[in-house]
Image: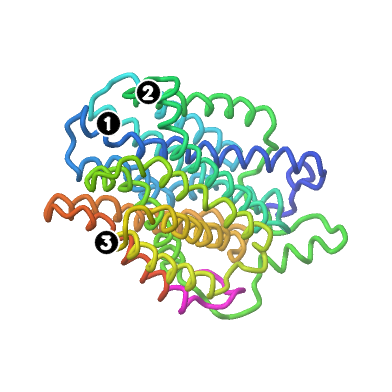
Amino acid sequence: MKISTITPAEEYITNAWRSFVVCALLLFVGINLRSIILAVPPVLPLIKHDLNLSYTAAGLLTSLPTLIMGATAWSSGLLVEKIGGRNAVTYGLILLAVGALLRALWSAAFPLYLFTVILGLGIALTQTTVPVLARHWFPTHIGLVTAIFTDGLIIGETLGAGATVPIMLGFLGKDAWIGSFVFWGAPVVLLLVFWLWLAPPASKLTPTHVPRSDGVEAQSEALAEPKTETRVSTFHLGFLLGSGSLIYFGMNSWIASYNQAIHQTTLTPLALTVLNAAQIPSSLVVTIFAQQLAGRRWPFVLAGFICATAISGWVFTPPNLEYMWAALLGASSALVFTLALSLPALLASPTRVARLTGATLSLGYSTAFIGPFIGGGLWDIFHIPALAFLPVFLASILLIFLGIFLPVYGARLR
């Protein structure tokens, strides 16, 4: 039996008010996906002390969600095709809420790692699904809607990294890292309620056409079927995304511990805030020009050069310059992530968006996982704090080469 590929009217969103509500939902989904995991690095020294963790084990804790996203994003893409995008986000938010809140029940290493795995599964499923829904609900504004979701991720990162310590000191107690888990986990429950109430339906199949109205169908088909014969490997795209993510997660994981080791702990709260807050203006600029910038080589090459310079400056210049280097690293990694995340939905045929998004995220986050974990291992072996940032420098160099050899926009992904 032939299955129709025409998007139902209730799924293809054209009403302005409904579009605003859905985009706001996706924005807040992004915020909650990141605030929970980026609230851990600021309190990592406390967790390491209370649970008697090594630097390697502490690095594993901060990179574990990244590892789970890398290991399960591809299978999450296949699951989305079976259960539909709306349901996938629902289940993802449930896993996120359960894992985030249950971490607070037992102050021991094993439960902490176990529930971090559970919330990581929720993040992987949800983040893989949103670009699929962007293509499904807004087929002519994929870059814009994906960038709005990315803005949410970045805002969540900024809130988690910058507000956790002030909130803990002001309201929860100076050593209340367990209470901070509850603080950031509770909003996910509220978000889940609004998602079930306001999110439009979405079928199990991604559409290939939308109703013709003022040329909309033609535009959607142009997006679905790139005209050039150039092909870009999903490995290329995955490692491109992964290099930017490794830079970002590597810095968030080790700033607090590094500053503690060099006796500059007073710099940590503002350095983490600047690293994450600098992403917001960068992401907003990319949001405005997302459709034009997608697939261009020069933004990735430029970001790689800036990150390589900044991490070198971080290690070899006086500590009071950390804020400047943090701003450059945050803005550049945001640019890479925002542009790379939109590519599968822009370049893939509609029925392959979910699995290609999943494959890209799997490769990307598997690459990003290597950074904090290896950084902590190098620190343990050689007892040199600066070696924790070596993977960040290598990722910056890799980003330059991947950007140089990125095929031109319009290529079909393999």
Quarter location, residue 400: bottom left
Q: What element carries label 3?
A: helix
How far across and how far down the image is residue 189, in percent?
53, 25
Please tell me how crowded label 1 is: few (under 14), some (14-19), or many (20+) other residues with Cα within 10 Å: some
- The label nearer to you, 2 versus 1, is 1
Question: Closest to the observer: 408 or 234?
Answer: 408
Q: Does the magenta stretch include residue 6?
A: no
Q: Residues within 10 Å of mark 2 (few under 14, many from 20)?
A: some
Secondary structure of the residue carrying tag 1 is: helix
Q: Say which residue label 1 marks.
A: 46
Instruction: Judge whether residue 273 can be spotted in this image.
Output: yes
**What's the residue type where badge 3 is placed?**
Leu
Whole-Å distance between the Cαs marked 1 and 3? 24 Å
Q: In which quarter of the image is residue 371?
A: bottom left
Which amino acid type corresponds to the residue marked 1 in the rendered image? Leu
Q: Is residue 1 among the parts visible in the rendering?
A: no
- Disc 3 target residue: 390
Label 2 residue SS:
helix
User: Measuring 49% from the left and 73% from the top, which residue is drawn there?
Assistant: 232
Hey, which quadrant is residue 208 in on the image?
bottom right
Out of 120 and 106, give the one closest to the viewer: 106
Residue bounds of the magenta highlight: 402-413
Q: Reply yes or no: does residue 404 show up in magenta.
A: yes
- Residue at 35% of width from left, 49% of height from top? 71
Per the image, the residue denoted by label 2 is: 102
